[in-house]
Amino acid sequence: MTSSPRPRLNRTVADLAPSGIREFFELVQTVKNVVSLGVGEPDFATPWHVCDEVYNSLRHGDTHYTSNAGTPELRQEISDLFARLYGVQYDPAQEVLVTVGVSEAIDLAIRTVVSPGDEVIIPDPSFVAYSACVKLAGGTPVLAPMREADDFKLRADTVRSLLTDRTRAILLGFPNNPTGSVMTRAELLPVARLAEERDLLVLSDETYDRLTYAGQHACFAELPGMWDRTILLNGFSKSYAMTGWRIGYACGPADLLDAMTRVHSYTMMCASTPAQVAATQALRGGEADVQRMKTAYDERRRVLVNGLRDAGLRCFEPLGAFYVFPNIESTGLTSKEFCRRLVEEQQVAVVPGTAFGPAGEGYVRATYATSMKNLKKAIGRIGGFVASL
Ligand SMILES: Cc1ncc(COP(=O)(O)O)c(C=O)c1O
């Protein structure tokens, strides 16, 4: 008797769709001479003094494990940064955990607080990993649509309409990838009140906090009553041009951070030691670099927004991160069709808005973390493409 083979994959993994970004970039790789506004990573190299510090540390044999939570020096610098920027206090010994990129911090935070069957509210559109990590933890992502008419901000009434007895947490990501929207302190307050009223945890991914172009970033943990129910997630990839180092961190109340550190100690042991040296140096001497890169992004942001508007696309003005999210409905194409034809006909890569959630239909994401020369070339080609339709 032949029995059918047993499935080889975990059921949740088997059902996990590939990221819409990866799917699209497989197509892009088949096209020659592409100008890419696709991948969300700085075109700048990591500041030289950061690399230099790491060379020195390697020469001195600094190649061993660190404590699970990260080096005391780096945790102290992270704690000082939050005190300095936002007046938020974290004890470096118990309330800061160094992770492998913000990516690990997101996964850890979700796995630490979500039990099977729990629901997590996730703004839509947003970073591709949120929903996937919630599913991997056995939870259910509940998408809260954000609209262009609301400047892609998360409305508390939308969140309220989605709450159930199973809602465990709200996952925020502002400045937002992919829209570039930001939320002010006043706009976050109703969300905070809801979290308090319904006893929810808030996981706040503030990866782009240093990249805001109008006004000061609002740190969620700083809002009244929020410190004790918030896990802040942040890192070095975007602000310090350190994507390849894979270094980030989480800050939050000791009970939650202690549990996250336990999970991290079994799965990662610790973040890479050279990357921790790099991150420490970035915090000690990298402020001028952050400002230099931010000034360049701001200039490019204006050029890209104006260029897309001149090309005939309605383009919401992004005030954070390094993405624009133009509306492409006037072309009559879906987001995927627009991206596929743009890369095939004009060799420009942008990402379908639907890669970030269903509310992204009708939009595409383009990044301005690329040279002005590339941006201008891309704008010319996008203009030609839209005019040809
Ligand atoms: C909102 C957001 N969070 C987290 C990440 C992951 O960052 P890291 O390179 O630190 O893992 C990204 C990367 O694109 C992002 O856009």
Image (cartoon, rainbow, N blue to C red):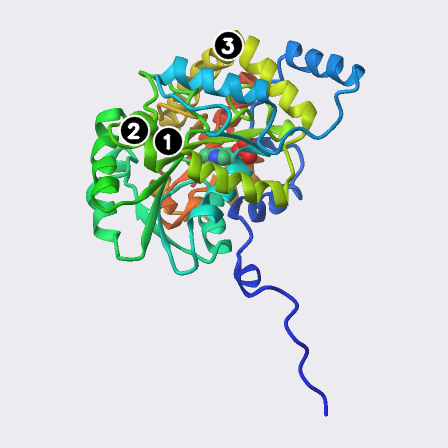
Q: Which residue is mark 2?
A: 183
Q: Is residue 241 visible?
A: no
Q: Give the CA distance from mark 3 to mark 2.
A: 23 Å
Above or below for 381 versus 280: below
Instruction: Please state the total of marks drawn on the protein image.
Output: 3
Amino acid under label 1? Answer: Phe
Amino acid under label 3? Answer: Glu
Question: Quarter holding the C terminus?
Answer: top left
Name which quarter of the figure residue 285 lies in: top right
The disc, 1 or 3, on the residue closer to the chain's N-terminal end is 1
Residue sitting at the far bottom:
1
Horizontal side, residue 283 vs residue 215: left or right: right
Q: What percent of the width, then of the height, locates residue 145?
A: 30, 46
Q: Which residue is mark 3?
A: 287
The disc, 3 or 2, on the residue closer to the chain's N-terminal end is 2
Horizontal side, residue 123 vs residue 105: left or right: left
Question: Quarter holding the N terminus?
Answer: bottom right
The disc, 1 or 2, on the residue closer to the chain's N-terminal end is 1
- Secondary structure type for disc 3: helix
Q: Give the CA distance from mark 1 to mark 2.
A: 7 Å
Q: What percent of the width, then of the height, locates residue 228?
A: 33, 34
Above or below for 273 versus 349: above
Q: Residue at x 23, y 40 (%)?
A: 196
Amino acid under label 2? Answer: Met
Q: What percent of the width, then of the height, locates residue 254?
A: 43, 34
Q: Would you say the beta carbon of the disc 2 residue lies within 8 angstroms of ligand 1?
A: no
Contact between labelled residues 2 and 1, with CB atoms less than 8 Å apart: yes
The crowd level at tag 3 (other Cα within 10 Å; few <14, some 14-19, many 20+) is few
Circle number at residue 256: none
Horizontal side, residue 224 vs residue 364: left or right: left
Circle number at residue 174: 1
Q: Residue at x 30, y 36 (%)?
A: 152
